[in-house]
Image (cartoon, rainbow, N blue to C red):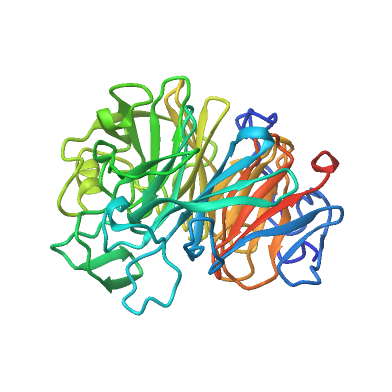
Amino acid sequence: MSLSRRGFFTLAGSSTASVILAAPLKNLYAKTLSKQSIKGRGFGKLIPDPNGILDLPKGFKYRVLSKTGEMMSDRTKVPDKKDGMAAFPGTNGTTILVRNHELKPDPTQKIAIVNAADSCKYDKLAPGGTTTLVIDNNYQVLQQYVSLSGTIRNCSGGTTPWGSWISSEEDVSTPITVANNSSDRMKESFQVSLKHGYNFEVPSHGKVTTPVPLKAMGRFRHEAIAVDPQTGYIYQTEDREDSCIYRFIPTQAGKLEAGGTLEALVIDGMPKMNTSVDFPMDEPKKVTWIRLEDVDPNEDTLRQEAQFKGAAIFRRGEGMCYGNGEIFWTCTNGGKAKVGQIFRYNPKAETVELFVESPSSEVLDFPDNLILSPFGHLIVCEDGKGEQFVTGVNPQGECYHFARNALNKAEFAGVCFSPDGKTMFVNIYEPGITLAVWGNWQAVL
């Protein structure tokens, strides 16, 4: 399929296979944001998939690795709603995928849940968690099993420098408040036996038999994390219309259960700044971090404490990644047009900058997960209302479509690359499909 649905827009920047967009992206909006302004070719136009699953450029192939309802190695079924995901090196050339499942309690039990023995669950009434896949270099699944269970709405998360996956709950249900505000757009009601709204650490090899909520990292509607390997600080997004950006400083490096200090981002001279409205483009702003005290509140009030102390407000912080000493995150419906922004934070300079604001869904439609590709391009998953794309951004600042969901209008999620850089993995959220994509990545234009 051609790129006719969207125009291209300037991002400007450079990167390498191990660095995200090294340059400051100073040319953003230097050119008109229109369908005719810039035509980033990427890998060329998309070719319709005869199987009706994934449109890709010429020379690329895909394979379905895992589908909801299939039987796994542990004799449980592959759960539904596949979301955030990461790839790790395994033994003998294998790749290990740890994959989230954004599931909530469902009295009808019409969907495949993360099923494990109650003794291994955090909350026996909660159906979410993670599954792990071990894949050989021929894209055959050698193992597939539950690695975390008893959690709710495991949306995204992130990897750690010590080789684990942080799985994040986008839910703040409690056994007292059965009415669950797990979405700003929808009210739900279901029963749980423990408080939720935490991060959980999952090993890349093996599974969690006794899930431990990382309470010191904060109780809120978690979305994603990114670790700065230089400092060990962990940055976090929150999926709320009035969310904040958080920073966790561990007491002991690599030992998150040991606790630490939680802080929120404040823009100097702009207390409680609403970054979705009239935030200056291409102007790095100095920031400070304020310490939060009630990090495990009974109600969903952490952001209220942060904003009372001057924390900046972001509209639906979602995907987050680290690269070149900087942290990047998306605000899915941020900006004047309410269809997406991307921010970057420079820890050394202590500055935050808005470097992408989509003027319409025709340019960028609800950016969500994002990651750096091994060939130096930023890759972004969309979670919009129309057709869904995986979008690439090249070092010259040109944006192009790399893949299209030809199956339905469900979002892409969990985009990541194998340790050897040869394979991209991605999920179609519903009906729940995990795919491997490969080809000549060096052919990018």
Residue 127 location (% of width, % of height): 35, 63
Q: 163 and 115: which one is in front?
A: 115
- Assign the C terminus to one quadrant of the image: top right
Q: Can residue 3 be seen in this view?
A: yes
Residue 114 location (% of width, % of height): 41, 60
Report how many numbered discs are placed on residues in the image: 0
| Residue at image location 36% in from the left, 54% down from the top | 149
Instruction: Decide if residue 207 is on the left or right side of residue 379.
Output: left
Q: 444 and 7: which one is in front?
A: 444
- Assign the N terminus to one quadrant of the image: bottom right
| Residue at image location 22% in from the left, 63% down from the top | 192
Q: Can residue 238 be seen in this view?
A: no
Vertical side of 43 occupied by 376: above or below: above
Vertical side of 358 occupied by 165: above or below: above
Residue 228 location (% of width, % of height): 46, 27
Vertical side of 15 occupied by 81: above or below: below
Residue 160 location (% of width, % of height): 46, 32
Instruction: Decide if residue 130 is on the left or right side of residue 127.
Output: right
| Residue at image location 70% in from the left, 70% down from the top | 406
Q: Quadrant of residue 210?
A: top left
Q: 210 and 321: which one is in front?
A: 210
